[in-house]
Image (cartoon, rainbow, N blue to C red):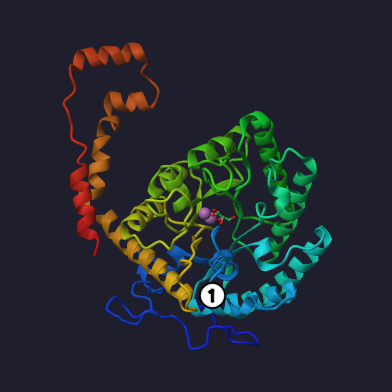
Amino acid sequence: MSAKIVVGKREYFKGIARISYEGPTSTNPLAYKYYDEDRKVDGKTLRDHLRFAVCYWHTFCGGGGDPFGPGTRHYAWNESSDPLQQARDKLDAAFEFFSKLNAPFYCFHDRDIAPEGRNPEESERMLKEIVKLAKEKQEASGVRLLWGTANLFSHPRYMNGAATNPDFAVVAHAAAQVKVALEATVELGGANYVFWGGREGYSYLFNTDMKREREHMAMFLRKSAEYGRGIGFKGPYLIEPKPMEPSKHQYDFDSATVIGFLREFGLEKDFKLNVENNHATLAHHSFAHDLQVAADAGMLGSIDANRGDPQNGWDTDQFPILLYDCVEAMLVVLGMGGFTTGGFNFDAKIRRNSTDLEDIFLGHIGGMDAFARALLIASELRKDAVFGRVRRERYASFDKGEGARFERGELGLKELRDIAAKAGEPRLSSGKQELLENIVNQYLR
Ligand code: XLS
Ligand code: NI
Ligand code: NI
């Protein structure tokens, strides 16, 4: 079902109506060219395949500030000098935006939707008030919560980490925040709960007990997971890997590191991964690589959809528009059978000099169209006889005979040596990379 448009006391996006599908030849910038939400691909609608979410932080909290200068966008919903009123206005603007864009989901940090108070009680009270209003908005619009999370990185108290802070008093504060953020997520029917540990890492090894910090992080995650289950949270907890920024050495470096960490501490049943394109590239992987690592472990929970800049070494969080990247991602997602609770969250922001109010619509339309188009292409590619066959056939020698016995663990080095001696030098077989690359390009239409 499409979202029902909800406008608060004041209409923030005047002159912008529902964004609808108009097809690839449309010249209307405020229309979808590929995201035809009811169209079915492989038995599922585009809406259910992609489960798009808008993030609160970049879209409604960020105004374009960077380390060299302040924000350039002065949004009307940020005008009130009373922080709680500002939060209410922002909520109105956010739901007007979600519903006009017709995005089925959204995501937030606790501090995006409500201000930080002078103490945990005050912060809790304000968050609860906004959650109550958000619930009404969700019901009125049909827009749902993909995931909630706690901001454990902005406040100065977290400068040495949150769960991994060397000071126990800070760890307790972080826990107080996660407790309420979990309650908010449950109250709003969130499908997942995310942990991104931006400050969980270190900058100098010789003032850091890394072993102890990682153990604290595992304990913190275990206690958080237990609490969430106790209040009825059924979805997966997701760790979002990132190698650096703001910490130099972030403990959740990449998919492989996080999977190892979860298994090391016995957390793999409750936790999966939320993989972000720009974080994968900061770890010197491709997006598809980190997705595949998570998928192979049965732990690809959700995606933060964005893109980095090939020349920059930081998280530029641009909207994903590179079709080739998106197709590779969709091949992995379709290959694992699609999402269950997860989706594509646009953890992406418009550029500092994108100052028109419509620009946040244009960014999201571009990202949604890129993934919709990629989904159609990836689905076709997966049906291409040659494209599928090459990978399968490369491993055919393990499908029967001695190869199959090796996979079953029936052959030791002694037997393998005798097999090699008998068979002689193996025939070289081509990896057929260029063939596959050319086929992919043929489908990019
Ligand atoms: C920052 C992260 C962050 C998480 C949510 O780089 O991507 O935005 O997605 O805390
Ligand atoms: Ni990021
Ligand atoms: Ni992210």
199 is higher (above) or lower (below) than 397: below
- The residue identified by callout 1 is 98
Q: Amino acid at mark 1?
A: Phe
Q: Nearer the viewer, residue 145 or 168?
A: 168
Quadrant placement of the C terminus: bottom left
The residue shown at (47%, 44%) is 294
Regarding residue 139, the answer to whether it shows in the image is no
Residue 417: % across, % down:
29, 13
Count of numbered badges drawn on the protein: 1
Tell me where residue 332 appears, x and y as whole percent.
38, 50
Residue at screen point 75% across, 75% down: 82
The percent position of residue 127, horizontal first and vertical second, equals 74, 66
Q: Secondary structure at mark 1?
A: helix
Left or right of 26? Residue 110 is: right
Which of 74/210 is in front?
A: 74
The residue drawn where x is 23% and y is 45% is 389
Q: Residues within 10 Å of mark 1 (few under 14, many from 20)?
A: many
**Residue nearer the viewer, 50 or 242:** 242
Q: In the picture, residue 10 is in which quadrant? A: bottom right
Identified at 58% across, 70% down, the residue is 60
Q: Nearer the viewer, residue 95 or 307?
A: 307
Q: Is residue 263 left or right of residue 292?
A: right
